Amino acid sequence: MEFDKVRSLLTDLTKTAYGKEKAEELRIHTKRQFIELELRQSYQYFLCLNKGQTFSHDQSYNLKRELKLLSIQGAVLTGDIFVLFRKLTDNIQSIFRWFDEERQSDCSSLYEVISYTRFEKKIIEDINKVIDEAGVVKDDASPELARIRMALYRKRSEQRRSFDKILSKLQKAGYIADIEESFLNGRRVLAIYAEQKRQVKGILHGESDTRRTSFIEPEETIEINNVIFSLENDERDEEYRVLKQLTSNLSVYHPLLLQYVEILGEYDFIRAKAKLGQMMDAHMPRLSDNSGIHLVKAFHPLLLIYNKKTGKKVIPLNLTLDEKSRILLISGPNAGGKTVCLKTAGLLQMMVQSGLMVPASPESTFGIFRQLLIHIGDTQSIEFELSTYSSHLKNMKFFMEEANGRTLFFIDELGSGSDPNLGGAFAEVFLEQLIKKHAFGVVTTHYLNLKIMASKTGGIINGAMAFDEKSLMPLYQLNVGKPGSSYTFSIAERIGLSPQLIDRARQLVDEGHFSLDKLLNKTEQDLRKIEMKEKDLQRLLKENEVLKKTLNSQIEKERHAQQIELLKNQNVVSLEKISYLKDMERKLKQIVFDWRRSEQEDDKKMLMKNMQALLFSQKDKQVREKVKKKLDSKYIEVDRDPVVGDLVLMQQNNKVGILSDIRGKKAIVNLGAMPLQVVYTDLTTVMEKEGLV
């Protein structure tokens, strides 16, 4: 099933030793609780990757050996190891910070990895007190170390001044070689020409390979070097003591640090599964307690990854095994994709039961099987003297003995390797027994008797790989519900075999067998034509649906525009009313104010008349507007210059008359009771002032 290749891809995506080990030992499980947790963890990390919201866990060091040393009493670890422990703890701290309350809820399965442990900040605090970023013991790691390093600093400064003075003096004398100075045995020495070595007082520490240069420690710096040497020993001793104390302090956290390593390894393993899911455009499928498989738009993962690189198209697989159709019998031409279909179903089932997402629609459903029985390819064995068919029979015997309702089996080319009639008969027996055992499975075959058996036996369903007889090319598409032709003669024609030979082969084939294969061939091609028409119909329906949505959208936009226009008009009317009422209020207030100030009776009477005119003028206006509306409903307005004989409407009293004459800026209108037909609107400014329209 090439499960090892999937496991190898997963292993390559891991970074930590722990994650790599888990990937290499990836197992197929049978407990739903475990499978569901693994799938949810992979899917939640997959979603985080897609959003770019993952947490940092880049610790890729294998710290098992160092942690084992930490648990040994009296052990002393180096500063470099403590730097790794600090990085490990920093990573754990970043993970705990990432999981805020909201993410603990949204990514509950991912949070479960750290839910049983805690973050201990004292680990980082203890290391930071002693070790710097480079893994060197700090000056203030202890008071004694601080004193020693300060004394060393002073002595080295004194040594440098003294040494530079001697070096300058000997350079002027011409005793100093090209390299001037060096260090031997931890002591600072001068490089003196060999012939001048007796001219310099001090200790000879050695000579160059050519014996042309001697290395001498000057007499003046011997005592200083001795003190420095002693202080350096004291420094090493104190550093050792500090590191030993730090090792002892952190040893109590040994179990916790082991947990941290496992946590980072576990997240590394989950990340690898999520990245593998990205590579194959995977989804999290549904799990079912019942046995069965329901694949929707499923792809072979390895084929999908390969074809993505080469730009080739992969045909999705739709397949269902349930209580009514427990065994799918796939037939069709060679190189038509039968084995790929079988391997796709098998490999996806194995991946799901290993906690891996699969390249299939999230609507796909997988049952959990306790047995996966697989028989694919040539299994002959020279060592045990088994032929291909003998091996085949041995495996079939095992299948029939072990199969049950929780078994999923895959058999490629059932009955092959023997006489077609005898092999076909045994193949029928195998399928009968597997049906009795309530097992589920996918079988590929060319045997005609098995195709007939599947159409008559409950629990077995035929499936055919589509083939385009016009182009004589396989379509790699599974059609469930009918058997497929092997297209033996069509393929023979495609490869250019002589027509005479093909006709002779047809004559030798049993007539009933040939007729049935021909009928299967014709049925498959007819079905293909129907599918093409159905695709065209679905395309037209989709186009119609799009047009319908577009039309509804336009209607809705128009309705919305009309409502906006209506509201605008209503607002205009409301504003006019508000303006009128404010004006009325202002005028009435003025009348009341003038009334109170007025002392003459005549003035008060005048104010009363003004108030009456103000109050009742609106009522008159409303009456005029009512009459105008009544007139407007009976007549149409014509937009042109008026001429004598036109009917005109007077705005002030809404009366209609005949325009009898126009004299310059004046118009004469005769009012009378005569039939009215047209109302003209375009008169001069003077006429508008006179109340004419």
Image: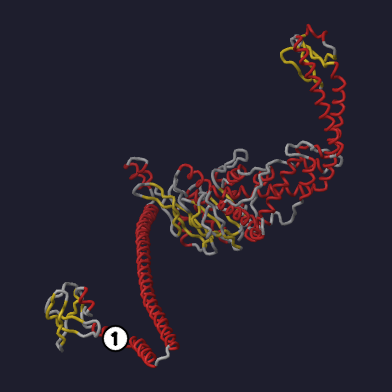
Residue 139 in the image: state x and y as whole percent: 80, 37
- Compared to 632, does 445 lie above or below? above
- Residue 658 relative to residue 555: left or right: left
- Compared to 282, does 691 lie above or below? below
Question: Which quadrant is home to the C terminus?
Answer: bottom left
Front residue of this view, candidates 637 and 92: 637
- Residue 691 relative to residue 474: left or right: left
- Residue 505 relative to residue 430: left or right: left
Q: Residue at x 53, y 46 (%)?
A: 302
Residue 616 in the image: state x and y as whole percent: 34, 89
Q: Residue at x 75, y 54 (%)?
A: 118
Residue 108 in the image: state x and y as whole percent: 65, 59
Q: Residue at x 82, y 11 (%)?
A: 200
Q: Is residue 401 visible?
A: no
How many neighbours does mark 1 have within 10 angstroms: few (below 14), some (14-19), or many (20 or more)? few
Q: Residue at x 19, y 77 (%)?
A: 680
Total tally of numbered discs in the picture? 1
- Residue 69 relative to residue 400: left or right: right
List the single residue furthest toward the front: 600
- Compared to 231, does 190 lie above or below? above
Three-letter code, disc 1 = Lys
- Compared to 487, does 567 lie above or below? below
Residue 130 in the image: state x and y as whole percent: 80, 41
